[in-house]
Image (spheres, helix red, strand yellow):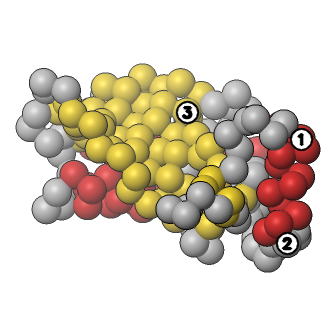
Amino acid sequence: QKDFSERRAGATAAIARISKQRAQTPRVVWAADRSRPAMLRGLRLKLAGKNLEQKSRKFITNNAELVVGTSADFQLIDERSTHDRKALRFQQTYKGLVVEGKTITTSFDAEGRLRAFHGNVADIGSIETKAKLQATKAIQVARDTVGHGAKVVTKNAKGKAVTTLVILP
């Protein structure tokens, strides 16, 4: 894991590169820890790629300092359209596991230019991904913690409770 100053310096350098591409600095909203941007708006960047997913992935890869670096991977989970915009949302994963609550959204205009980037990601470094509880115990702990009536347990087609291993940052 990088320390604050390394993350901030990397993010600032990425924003400077982006500013040169469009001859203007985008609007930046910094994350609560001030180490990386939570949102960049007013980008209007023309990016190479066959489709918006490719353009998004290329932007994320080329500007990894805006996110968390190389330990993160992102899976496309949602696409939404309005009359003149399209947004793609990516779930952060690590070694194939979902990093709970951590996503990136890219927004494009009708011409396919990247307009905005929003990132809520975790710098998880290198962690153990083996489950610490057996599935039945995990279900019981969830029910005991939240209550039996809460919908904290996913059920399969047969109505049996199933568990999903995730990373809680």
Residue at numbered disc 3: 38
Query: Badge 2, how many Cα within 10 Å: few under 14, some, many 20+?
Result: few
Q: Earlier in the sequence, mark 1 or mark 2?
A: 2
Q: Position of residue 79 (x, y in %)?
A: 29, 44
**C-alpha distance separating marks 1 and 3:** 31 Å
Query: Badge 3, how many Cα within 10 Å: few under 14, some, many 20+?
Result: many
Q: Nearer the viewer, residue 25 or 119?
A: 119
**C-alpha distance separating marks 1 and 2:** 16 Å
Q: Position of residue 74 (x, y in %)?
A: 48, 60
What is the secondary structure assignment of the residue under circle 3? strand
Q: Position of residue 37 (x, y in %)?
A: 56, 35
**93 up-or-down from 149: above or below:** below
Res. 115 image quadrant: top left
What is the secondary structure assignment of the residue under circle 1? helix
Kind of residue sitting beneath label 2: Gln
Residue at numbered disc 1: 145
**18 up-or-down from 6: above or below:** above
Q: Is residue 61 left or right of residue 1?
A: left
Kind of residue sitting beneath label 3: Ala
Kind of residue sitting beneath label 1: Thr
Residue at numbered disc 2: 134
What is the secondary structure assignment of the residue under circle 2? loop
Q: Residue at x 52, y 40 (%)?
A: 119
Q: Nearer the viewer, residue 165 or 74?
A: 165
Q: Nearer the viewer, residue 77 or 50?
A: 77
Q: Position of residue 1 (x, y in %)?
A: 76, 60
Res. 108 image quadrant: top left
